[in-house]
Amino acid sequence: MIVDRRARAAHYTAVIIGAIIMAAPLLWMVTSAFKSPAEVIAYPPTWWPESLQLSNVTAAFEILGARAFVNSALFAIVVVTVQGAICLSAGFALAKLRFRGAKPMFTLFVTAMLVPPHVMLLPMFLVVKEFDLLNTYVGLMLPIVAQTGFGTFLFRQYFTSLPDEMVEAARVDGAHWGQVFLRIAAPLARPAVAAYAAISLLNAWTMYAWPLVAARSSEMRVLPLVLAPLATSEHSITPISTVMMAVLLTTLPMLIVFLAAQNQFVKGLGGAVKE
């Protein structure tokens, strides 16, 4: 009994220390965003600002621009919504429908997950350029929407855990496959949808390489493209506290989304991993 308590105490201690180590950089970014530039680089460093510099918020917004926020939000929402609808229906079909070629098709989806994203940049660019879609929302979003490997795998694994008797009972009652999917399977997949949405939304919000290739004009830039130059010597005149605030404003929407969906996120991944 004493050994179990010691082991549990050691486990909790390790978890707490790990959480502190992981949270420290985030806390430093948040506090530095409200400091003056001199406080950020002061030695010895201080965690809390002497007075909140709310002017950093306005300065950061001027650097980022409202258009970049709109572009990032539109890009992330459209990609997650359209790609999610495709993955959700494909995952259900692969899990519950019996048709020839289902297993090879599922293997193809899994294999697509193993291809490094940067390997696909050149083919995607050539296709988008051939259709004259560079610097357009369609050209920016469509190639990412088509990357359905992860979502299909996640939903297929989740739907596999649903009892077949539930689907068979609905079919016996006269429901066609569309009704089974929309009225039974999709509502039960809310945890998996939340997990997929959190992961895919974060991926789309922070995506840098493809928007850099497909969105060259300033009107099409997303937030990562606006933030990246702040780390170069050309923008060294920008106060570091303003840069911290710009990073905080960019990070905040995803942090809110994750905190709001974390319970469903854990349930969804847990249901998929069990299979």
Image (cartoon, rainbow, N blue to C red):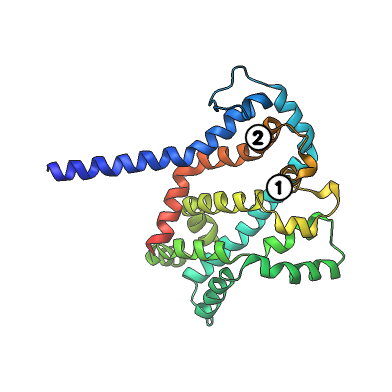
Q: Classify 181 as above or below 68.
A: below
Give how far across and how far down residue 154 sits, in percent: 50, 61
Q: Which mark is residue 244?
A: 2
Q: Residue at x 55, y 49 (%)?
A: 198
Q: Is residue 126 left or right of residue 160?
A: right
Give how far across and how far down residue 143 sits, in percent: 72, 64
Q: Which quadrant is home to the C terminus?
A: bottom left
Q: Classify 95 as above or below 45.
A: below
Q: Is residue 134 left or right of residue 42?
A: right
Q: Residue at x 63, y 30 (%)?
A: 41
Query: In the displayed image of the protein, which residue is found farthest to the top?
Result: 51
Dot 1, how many residues are within 10 Å of its Cα: few (below 14), some (14-19), or many (20+)? many
Q: Residue at x 24, y 43 (%)?
A: 8
Q: Residue at x 67, y 53 (%)?
A: 207
Q: Classify 218 as above or below 161.
A: above
Q: Classify 271 as above or below 258.
A: below
Q: Which quadrant is home to the N terminus?
A: top left
Mark 1 and mark 2 in contact? Answer it, CB < 8 Å. Answer: no
Based on the displayed image, in which of its 4 quarters is residue 69 positioned? top right
Q: Is residue 176 left or right of residue 121?
A: left
Dot 2, how many residues are within 10 Å of its Cα: few (below 14), some (14-19), or many (20+)? many
Q: Is residue 202 left or right of residue 217?
A: left
Q: Which residue is mark 1?
A: 224
